[in-house]
Amino acid sequence: MEILRIVLTVIYVIDCVALTVVVLMQEGKQQGLGAIAGIADTYWGKNKGRSAEGNLIRATKIMAVLFIVLSMVLNMNF
């Protein structure tokens, strides 16, 4: 069981670093004054799921869930 804890801790640390990097790579959510007039609806704004930004958001969600699950598992006394 101790080996499992060590392996999960290593995965946890890698996930923490990767999550930090992915969050820092994302663009800000501020769209400037164009959002007030409704000009922000561009091709990239409508198709964010297929863009690099959409992939970063998806990766952030996956790594955040992994972070929470590993946090709970590592805090169990098994």
Image: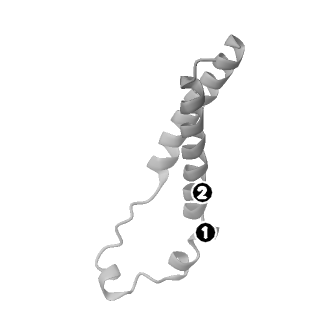
Q: Residues within 10 Å of mark 2 (few under 14, many from 20)?
A: few
Percent x, y of residue 54: 58, 63
Q: Quadrant of residue 77?
A: top right
In whole angstroms, how far apart are the C-alphas of marks 2 and 1? 8 Å
Percent x, y of residue 27: 44, 59
Q: Quadrant of the N terminus?
A: top right
Question: Identity of the amino acid at label 1?
Answer: Gly
Q: Residue at x 54, y 62 (%)?
A: 53
Question: Identity of the amino acid at label 2?
Answer: Arg
Q: Quadrant of the C terminus?
A: top right
Task: Please identify the residue farthest to the front as the structure is shown.
Answer: 77
Task: Please identify the residue farthest to the top as the structure is shown.
Answer: 2
Q: Earlier in the sequence, mark 2 or mark 1?
A: 1
Q: Residue at x 54, y 39 (%)?
A: 68
Q: Is residue 7 above or below residue 26?
A: above
Pointer 2 with pointer 1, Cβ within 8 A: yes
Mark 1 sits on what residue? Answer: 49
Mark 2 sits on what residue? Answer: 58
Q: Quadrant of residue 76?
A: top right
Q: Residue at x 55, y 57 (%)?
A: 57
**Callout 2: SS:** helix
Percent x, y of residue 61: 56, 52
Towards the viewer: 56 or 73: 73
Q: Is residue 38 above or below residue 78?
A: below
Q: Residue at x 48, y 40 (%)?
A: 20
Q: Residues within 10 Å of mark 1 (few under 14, many from 20)?
A: some
**Callout 1: SS:** helix
